[in-house]
Amino acid sequence: MFFRRSSNDSPEKKARLLERMKQALGATKQSLVNKIEAVLSARAEIDETVLNELEETLLGADLGISVTDRIINAIRMQKKDQGIKTAEDAKNEIRKQLLSILSPQSVAEPKLSQGQPSVWMVVGVNGTGKTTTIGKLAARFSKENMKVMICAADTFRAAAIEQLAIWAERSGAELIKSKPGADPSAVLHDALSAAMARHADVVIVDTAGRQHTKSNLMLELEKMKRVASRKIPGAPHEILLVVDATTG
Ligand SMILES: Nc1nc2c(ncn2[C@@H]2O[C@H](COP(=O)(O)OP(=O)(O)OP(=O)(O)O)[C@@H](O)[C@H]2O)c(=O)[nH]1
Ligand SMILES: [Mg+2]
């Protein structure tokens, strides 16, 4: 499904778009529920034939192999232990499994060690949301009373530094930047010096978007990692790869 983003849309148009999205998602949910109902209704017991049909239905609904296996195995195990006897029990188990898969996972926290700042590098191909993710992380860490610094090591794309400056201001983080075209490793070096001098808890490093096939740009990342580890042993402590959630 593809929805074009446009900030100039009228409120009516936005409302219609939201309604269409709700309908589309509602239809997906309803069709999955109907298909599961169709397999389970009028079945006196959950046998291997039912499990096979259920497996086909879940795979056909694009739940993927690992989620389908998890659900089918859970039902099979509980059937063996007499936990699942009726179609209703099976439906409840499917609901339980899906909810546990969809429930929020715990988010990593910066590990604070020996008073040294924790260094998080954010990497990925162009336009996947690296800078936006940094803004959100900075806001969250600031809210948790951490002293956050952001390093503008995307010196390549025009306006990248200004974009990051807005996020830094919004989140109350300090931005360490240089001029467009500067060596990203040099900016990182300065940012880590500043972070140590000012006892920052975490430094989040923005990097320019890059494809893994561009060897010179991958070498640039290697250099940044070396600079970070020379400045602070163990850094970078986390390297976050930001990907578009719709990538297949
Ligand atoms: N729908 C949606 N849009 C997002 C999300 N994250 C970022 N965007 C938008 O995607 C566009 C690119 O986001 P950026 O954060 O600038 O991406 P980037 O990876 O830093 O891009 P480059 O620095 O050019 O490589 C912006 O218009 C963001 O508003 C998201 O989670 N959902
Ligand atoms: Mg960016």
Image (spheres, rainbow, N blue to C red):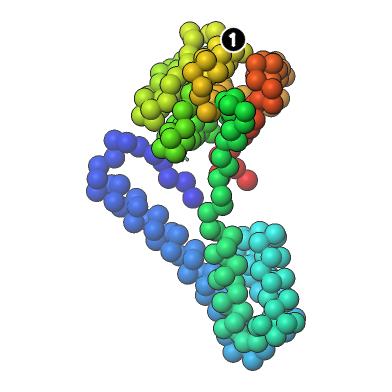
Name the residue at the front extreme: 114
Question: How many numbered discs, if any?
Answer: 1
- Which quarter of the rendered picture does the C terminus lie within? top right
Judge by depth and name the residue closer to the eye, 91 or 96: 96
User: Residue drawn at (43%, 35%), measured in percent from left and top?
Assistant: 145
User: Residue drawn at (59%, 72%), measured in percent from left and top?
Assistant: 94
Give above or below for 227 relative to 239.
above
Q: Residue 246 appears at what percent x and percent y?
A: 56, 45
Judge by depth and name the residue closer to the eye, 125 or 90: 90
User: Residue drawn at (65%, 26%), measured in percent from left and top?
Assistant: 236
Report which quarter residue 53 is drawn in: bottom right
Judge by depth and name the residue closer to the eye, 14 or 123: 123
- Residue behind label 1 places its C-beta within 8 angstroms of ligand 2: no
Report which quarter residue 25 is drawn in: bottom left
Q: How busy is the neighbourhood of tag 1: few (under 14 within 10 Å), some, or many (20 plus)?
A: some
Q: Mark 1 points at which residue?
A: 186
Q: Residue 64 appears at what percent x and percent y?
A: 66, 59
Task: Let me know if residue 157 appears in the view.
Answer: no
Q: Residue 191 appears at what percent x and percent y?
A: 53, 16
Judge by depth and name the residue closer to the eye, 241 or 82: 82
Task: Let me know if residue 45 appears in the view.
Answer: yes
Q: Determine the secondary structure under disc 1.
A: helix
Q: Residue 221 appears at what percent x and percent y?
A: 66, 20
User: Residue drawn at (53%, 28%), measured in percent from left and top?
Assistant: 202
What amino acid is at disc 1?
Ala
Give above or below for 31 relative to 105.
below
